[in-house]
Amino acid sequence: MEMFIDPHIHVTSRTTDDYEAMRKAGVVAIIEPAFWLGQPRTEVGSFKDYFSTLIGWERFRAKQFGIVHYCTMGLNSKEANNIPLAEEVMELLPLYVGKEGVVAIGEIGYDDQTEAEDRFYRLQLELAKEVSLPVLIHTPHRDKKKGTTRSMDVSEEHGLDPKMVIVDHNNEETVKEVLDRGYWAAFTIYPHTKMGSERMVEIVKQYGPERIIVDSAADWGVSDPLAVPKTAALMRQRGIPEEHIRMTCYQNALTAYSQSGQMDEMDWLNPEPIDQRQKQYGNSVLRGGQTPKVEGSDYVEN
Amino acid sequence: MKDNPVDKEKVKSFLLEVLKENVDSKSIEWLLQQKEKIAMEASYLKFYMAFSQASRYFKKQLLSLSEKDKEKANQLVKGFSPASWDQLQTARSYLLLHFEENDPSTWVKALNKLFETADMHEQQSLYAAIPLMPFQKEMTERAIEGLRTNISSVFDAVALNNPFPSKYFDERAWNQMVIKAIFLQRPLYQIQNADERANHNLAKILTDFAHERWAAGRKVMPELWRFVGPYIDGENITDIKKVLDSGDLLHKKAALLACSLSDFSEAKKLLELYPDLKAAIQNGNINWESIGKEFQSTIQ
């Protein structure tokens, strides 16, 4: 079966139906970047518990549907503007960046492009260097072109190698510079805003598959957890070569993030069998009376 | 309960010895470097980072141990069973023992932070290592918190192959642990000192649980009857009879093994009705471990 990686999806806000649909569509691995929750947090403990969820419960939940879950750790640009809180989060981050399956520092960068955002972006670039992790840059929605250029300028000022940096949320206006400067260029496919699959196909036609990454960034807003497989299907329909589809919807993400040493194809090519009985009762993702999915054995109910 | 202090130095060198037998020298080299750094650094961060980054140098592969190693482990800390440990958690426990803090409340606070920010495997390592920690009684609440997890590998680290619960849990916590282990269908024979901590309340809770399951047309796991056996009475003997009449040999064996733990005359009489199985119980061929293993093989 065709395999996909969705290297940007906020699955903590998605349902188990989404997980099932993703697995069915061929998504084998996902990366969940640490982001905000749709409203600002007010306590550092909320960050701590969120980070712990990313390396704990959510990873466990994904595994029950046969999907390998990785994450990135970081202080997002929006919440960098609450300076006292941001300082506390910066003290917390070193505890999380060395955890297993943390494949990058991110998503970090600019939102309003304030002084505070700049300060915490730079601090996190230094952190990434210190622990030899790639960086996932969130480019701003407003004043995007300038913000994207600035993100790369500052990253270079701190001496990061472009091949260790993934610049996300690109569009037709930003892609050329990002690729020319040697960065990975990620594209978020949103149903109504940012990039749609049609535009994505045109970009791959124009620029080829090298260093281009497709993701869904699906979250609590209107978004599509199947954006990667759907875009791949559209590429195929429009005559994009198979190898280009594989690169943009699977291999490039793997190559970029496996630079962390924390992501390995064998994690899904040679996985433990899915077993939802190795669970979590109480708040199990399975409720009483449901039959869990078990590969390679018959389920015998107690 | 009296705290028997762990001989930390001896445990450290035992863990290191075992690791040397199991992993390559590059990993050991890294571990020894981290040990030095932890000792030199006043901040806890070095320790926290080393604890996490151990995953880059050690695998989640079960330790391979000689019989002598196993005996030695048990001599060092009664009940300590590294045969159920993997290489990575052994390395993490080794680092943990190098985290020096002489004041118990400061130590517990630092450890709690590690627990609260731990990923799945780190939690598993920490809970399993509690019996090796310098301050144990102080970790009781933390261990109880570990039972509230939804992640079975973390639950197992507290409940199974661990001498801590039977030594430190009060009856309420102990009973919760056993009940949850039954809910999760965990191998109960791996709970240490299970018979010593059997109690009347637990027997009552478990027969109530069996009634609930039966009402829903479901079965209960056969190992459950181990905890009822010593408390068989005029009331719950009907439950034992019901299991005996169920026609399933594994469940029948479990019910009879429970009867063998009882002084209640009717239970003894039931045992007499099955002379072959009674003989197998007496010569040890039927025991809770064999029942537990057979049951686990039917659900896996």
Image: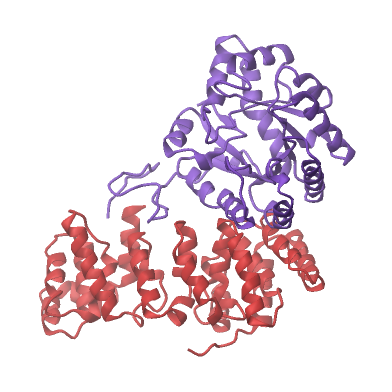
User: In which quarter of the view is residue B89 placed?
Assistant: bottom right
Above-or-below relation of A176 to B51:
above
- Looking at this view, is A208 or B105 the one in front? B105
Above-or-below relation of A229 to B222:
above
**Colour in which chain B is drawn:** red
Apparent side of residue B259 relative to residue A163 in the rendered image (left or right): left
Q: Residue at x 69, y 69 (%)?
A: B95
Q: Residue at x 53, y 21 (%)?
A: A230
Q: Residue at x 45, y 76 (%)?
A: B165
Q: Position of residue A64 (x, y in %)?
A: 45, 44
**Colour in which chain A is drawn:** purple
Q: Residue at x 37, y 52 (%)?
A: B300
Q: Position of residue B209 (x, y in %)?
A: 24, 65
- Looking at this view, is B100 or A247 the one in front? B100
Apparent side of residue A161 relative to residue B288 in the rendered image (left or right): right
Above-or-below relation of A13 to B202:
above
